[in-house]
Image (spheres, helix red, strand yellow):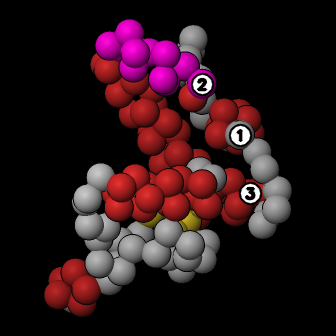
Amino acid sequence: EVVSSLKRPPYFIAHNAKFDLPFLWKRSVINGIKPASGFNPYGRNGTDFYCTMESWAGFNGRIGLDNLAKVFSIHGKMEGMTGADVWPEYKKGNIAKIAEYCRDDVKTTKEIYEKLTFKTI
């Protein structure tokens, strides 16, 4: 069982995965970092990845991570920062603030995934 699980491609959980996964793949290629074997940035929701936005809003629908968190009474975005603030904060050298913002997004996405799938990870 362990060996067979190691042969499977990585499985990602994301909000707006159809943006995130191609972006990560392109950045890894640009920076000379070989993507994990079997990583399919243009895969299918539920097979290659799980997208909380698509699962809730449908194939063409959209809902922000913060708004979806509110649906489930989950703590949403970090107060005082949005994705638009990441680059300006980076230029100021506020890497710790960006890391906190990203950790918060990961935690929120995980909690939404658990609500949508009735699974604990």
User: Does the CB distance between marks 3 and 2 fall below 8 Å?
Assistant: no
Which residue in the protein does label 3 denote?
56
For this view, does 45 lie left or right of residue 64? left
Residue 17 vs residue 27, the one in the foreground: 27
Q: Where does residue 68 sit, x and y in percent of width and height?
A: 70, 41
Q: Is residue 98 above or below residue 56?
A: above
- Please, is residue 102 above or below residue 90 in the view? below
Identify which residue is drawn at 82% across, 62% down.
Answer: 60
- Range of magenta residues: 84-94
Q: Secondary structure at mark 2?
A: helix
Marks 3 and 2: which is nearer the front? 2
Residue at the image point whose x is 35% and y is 61% from the top: 29
Please tell me the numbered disc located at residue 64. 1
Cα distance between the residues tagged 1 and 3 = 11 Å
Q: Position of residue 27 (x, y in %)?
A: 40, 53
Query: Residue 32: horizontal and vertical position, in percent?
Result: 26, 59
Q: Nearer the viewer, mark 1 or mark 3?
A: 1
Residue at mark 2: 84
